[in-house]
Image (cartoon, rainbow, N blue to C red):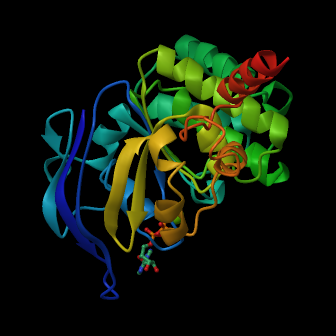
Amino acid sequence: MLIVENVRFSYASGVEALKGVSLTVKDSEFVAIMGQNGAGKTTLIKHFNGLLKPTSGSVRINGVETTKTSVATLARDVGFVFQNPDHQLFSETVDDEIAFALKNFGYEAEVIEKRITWAVNLLGLTQYRKTSPFMLSGGERKRVALASVLAWDPKILVLDEPTIGQDHRQKENLRQFIMQMQTQGKTIVMVTHDVEFVAECNPRVVLMREGKIVADGAGKEILTNPVLLEQSSIVLPQIAQVFAKLTGQGFPLDIIDIYEAKDLLMEKLRRRS
Ligand SMILES: Nc1ncnc2c1ncn2[C@@H]1O[C@H](COP(=O)(O)OP(=O)(O)O)[C@@H](O)[C@H]1O
Ligand SMILES: [Mg+2]
């Protein structure tokens, strides 16, 4: 469980990036944090593994206040994948990169080898095990960063803009992978402005604006609210745009799922024929 209580945070520059944020994420929940650039999303999630500490208010991870423990200890529970993988990667090979944290956590060589094999397999990186992460594409580096975090099996996974640099197929893999993590009971918090990706995943959506949370609810609710999205410079998912243009046809107003959309349209066609 992740409990954020009335957190304010100011950078040394004087910018107040969080202006009283409260948020609870329960175990096994899947939450997408959305909002325009500079809304405070990254600042907020950096509080989840203690990289940043609140100026006032508190953040508790599984009952432990982040000010009362170390980033290293928190990392055991909270796996954080940065928006820019270059802030995270430093080893000479993909293998070494993934092994690094595992060694730090004191795993034995055999276990480490198994975990690496599992993680590279899962993220389609097997052929790059002996390659330098810096020889890889941006999207591949992001997957290396993700693999190195997953390898130690944290309970909470925090992903900052995971879809950037990923093509359509890789995004679909990422979605499948997130769903799989969810069925394993992991808590997932993802920051993204990729509205189509969020529509496909259909998580709980937390919308931030100017250092505050302005909406929090089911993906279906928030991603079909044009006024709310407009205020955050987010466009409606395409499916929602189609149904917004079909008002008066008796369709529900909260459709973001492509299969639900198909079923509704097929049903309508059947009735007409
Ligand atoms: N390291 C930093 N030093 C000073 N100000 C920062 C720093 N990082 C972010 N900010 C400012 O804090 C605000 C929130 O930024 P950020 O959390 O990165 O937003 P988001 O991830 O939603 O785009 C912005 O005004 C940004 O300019
Ligand atoms: Mg950000």
Residue 247, image x, y percentages: 63, 47
Image vertical order of residue 7 relative to residue 120, above or below: below
Q: Is residue 165 visible?
A: yes
Q: Is residue 87 shown left or right of residue 143?
A: left
Q: In this view, does 19 lie above or below 96?
A: below
Residue 234: x %, y % from top left: 59, 63
The C terminus: image quadrant: top right
- Is 120 displayed left or right of 162 in the figure? right
Residue drawn at x 28%, y 31% as measured from the top left: 26
Residue 146 lies, in percent from the top left, at 60, 38
Question: Height in image: 119 above or below 204?
Answer: above
Relative height, residue 31 to residue 9 (above, below):
above
Q: In which quarter of the image is ligand 1?
A: bottom left
| Residue at 76% from the left image edge and 52% from the top image edge | 165
Query: In the rendered image, which quarter contains the N terminus?
Result: top left
- The structure residue drawn at horizontal position 53% and vertical position 39%, both measured from the top left corner, is 254
